[in-house]
Amino acid sequence: MAAAVAKRQNVLIALAIHAFTASGIVLAMLAAVSAYKLDWQAFFAWLGIALFVDGVDGPIARRFHVERNLPTISGAALDFVVDYVTYVFLPAFALATGGFTSAPIALALAGVIVFTSALYFADTRMKMKNNAFRGFPAVWNGVVFLFFVFRPPTEVIVGVTLLLAVLTFLPVAFVHPVRVERWRPVTLAVTVVWFVLAGITLAESLAPPAVVAWSLLATSLYLASVAAVQQGLDWFDRARRGL
């Protein structure tokens, strides 16, 4: 009897965690409504909350063994659905409609983003052995957020978008802030600082003081490059030892 009660409790906990993950798609809907109104401050606020949900639901699911307790629902598939909308589709829509460049160029760049990211999400080699991502992990929400903050010229937007689209398919490591163990305390600290800076930026209607904007860029560059630096150090170490 006690075992049956415990099993039912575990199933209910697993369902609650899946519901928490699925809430990300409701946040995406609210972000879409904000984008329709061209309210970019609210748009990125909703995506920021969705990003937080995505950052914590995985550790919670692993802590409560959700996959084992409720195998009929795929948490990975649910996560992919939410992530593609919030990390890729909506940021691409924002790039296409945010007034950065001419409509043909903006639509072409948005098409590149959604197309390459769809292929990336289907790649079974997405994760490396150390839990880093293989290739740019389609975090276009962060990239487009920086575009809105800095409003760079068309040439920069085109160059960055195409570079990251190419990096999507190259074996270059990108960090998972929670699951990559190497330098994790530093990476987690930088991630927290990034969230604080992003919150300040949103509070300032995407026009923060220069020190906040450049600090946001610096923390973004750290998160974008730290795993590649680690990868390069590993390659150098193996070459030095003749392996």
Image: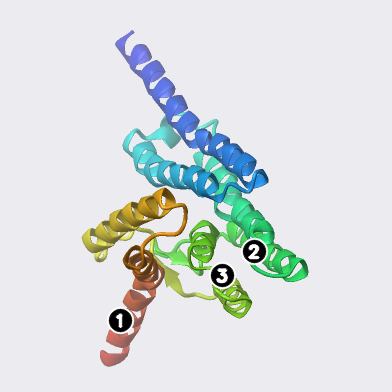
Tag on residue 168?
3
Q: Is residue 187 left or right of residue 213?
A: left
Q: Residue at x 57, y 78 (%)?
A: 156
Dot 1 or dot 3, earlier in sequence? 3
Answer few, some or many: residues within 10 Å of disc 2's Cα (few below 14, many 20 plus, some between 14 and 19): many
Residue 32 position within the rendered picture, expressed as x and y whole percent measured from the top left = 63, 43
Residue situated in front as seen by the camera: 225 or 10? 225
Q: Is residue 160 left or right of residue 185?
A: right
Residue 185 position within the rendered picture, expressed as x and y whole percent measured from the top left = 22, 59
Tag on residue 150?
none
Answer few, some or many: residues within 10 Å of disc 1's Cα (few below 14, many 20 plus, some between 14 and 19): few
Task: Identify residue for label 1.
Answer: 233
Q: Residue at x 51, y 33 (%)?
A: 23
The answer to whether the residues at label 1 and label 3 have Cβ atoms under 8 Å apart is no
Task: Identify residue for label 2.
Answer: 113
Mark 1 or 2, which is nearer the eye? Answer: 2
Inspect the image, locate mark 3, and give the three-letter code of the amino acid beneath it: Thr
Q: Quadrant of the N terminus?
A: top left
Dot 2 or dot 3, earlier in sequence? 2
Inspect the image, locate mark 2, and give the three-letter code of the amino acid beneath it: Ile
Answer few, some or many: residues within 10 Å of disc 3's Cα (few below 14, many 20 plus, some between 14 and 19): many
Q: Secondary structure at mark 2?
A: helix
